[in-house]
Image: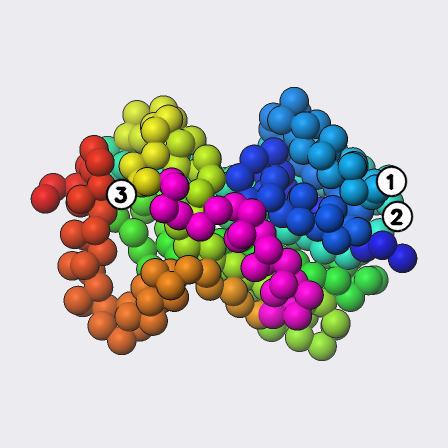
Amino acid sequence: MNKVVIITGASSGIGRALALEFAKNGHHLSLCARNLTALQEVANFCNTYGIYCEIFQADVSKKEECEKFIDFTIQKFNQIDVLINNAGISMRALFEDCSLEDFEKVMNINFWGTVYCTKYALPYLLQTKGQVIGISSIAGYRGLPARTGYSASKFAMNGFLESLRTELLYTGVNVMTVAPGFTASNIRNTALDGKGNMQKESPLNEKELMSSEECAKWIYKAYQKRKRNLVLTTQGKLTVFLNKIFPNWMDKKVYEHFANEADSPLKK
């Protein structure tokens, strides 16, 4: 029987690439995002692989919509094999400049969205001995300046998933945390600035980053192996490693790196 995969935030970026990768490999899909038009375009591509793809408009920061999305999936497929918590938003502003409302928005989507969807999907994942996958970030291993809200949400996600993994150790359900590193996607374009507006232009050279498609291929391979953690890109792996060994030195290096970004809010 073909497995049923849920992907949140599937209308663009890594979520879109994951939907196409899983569809290409014969998995049925239940996708959600806030942008229904973009989501329908993704579904149209996925359906060309001969699988069933259902879509649902939802804002994962609202638990009622998460519950309705999971119920919708069960009504359509009667099972859930994989939940990929991918929906996310970033922020690029100094903590002293950002509003608490914007900080909460980032936490609500990135962290609470993961908690809500996992809570409602877990009974069905226990039945299928499936997988929970969280698309986290290097920012969940190493706090990044001018990304306090984003880093906080990803640290929280990592802690939640690690605790859940331990709870589910003998149930047959696998829990995997993925840290993609810098990947070409629209998350930096939609990142909130100090005034709560989308910054629109990425401060990075997106052409030099790992593509969302390549990232999705690595995630699919790790899913097949039911891995515990996946840290991507050489820079990402090096950052996680060095931060454990030389944390004080890394504070300075990370500051310097982000201070050199275009229009950085950090002082050089």
Q: Amino acid at mark 3?
A: Ala
Quadrant where the N terminus is found in the figure = bottom right
Q: Are marks 2 and 1 in contact (CB under 8 Å)?
A: yes
Residue in the foreground of this view, choosing between 59 and 52: 52
Is 162 located above or below residue 203 in the figure? below
Q: Which SS type dominates the magenta stretch?
A: helix
User: Image point 86% across, 45% down: which residue?
Assistant: 77
Q: Amino acid at mark 2?
A: Asn
Reading the image, the residue beneath label 3 is: 146
Where in the figure is residue 137, as x and y percent of width and height?
A: 44, 54
Q: Residues within 10 Å of mark 2 (few under 14, many from 20)?
A: few
Rendered residue at 69%/61% (across/down): 131
Which amino acid, mark 1? Gln
| Nearer the observer, 226 or 221 | 221
Asked whether, in this view, residue 30 is left or right of residue 249, the answer is right
**Residue labelled with disc 1:** 75
| Residue 91 vertical placement versus 37 (above, below) | below
- On the image, the x and y values in percent for residue 244 come to 31, 72
Q: Report how far apart the C-alphas of labels 2 and 3 lie in the structure.
A: 43 Å
Q: Residue furthest left?
A: 268
Residue 177 in percent (x, y) is at: 54, 61
Tell me how far mark 2 sits from mark 1, CA to CA.
6 Å
Residue occupying the point 67% across, 44% down: 20
* Residue 143 visible at all: yes
> Which element is circle 1 on?
helix
Q: Dot 2 corresponds to which residue? A: 78
Q: Which residues are magenta?
A: 206-227
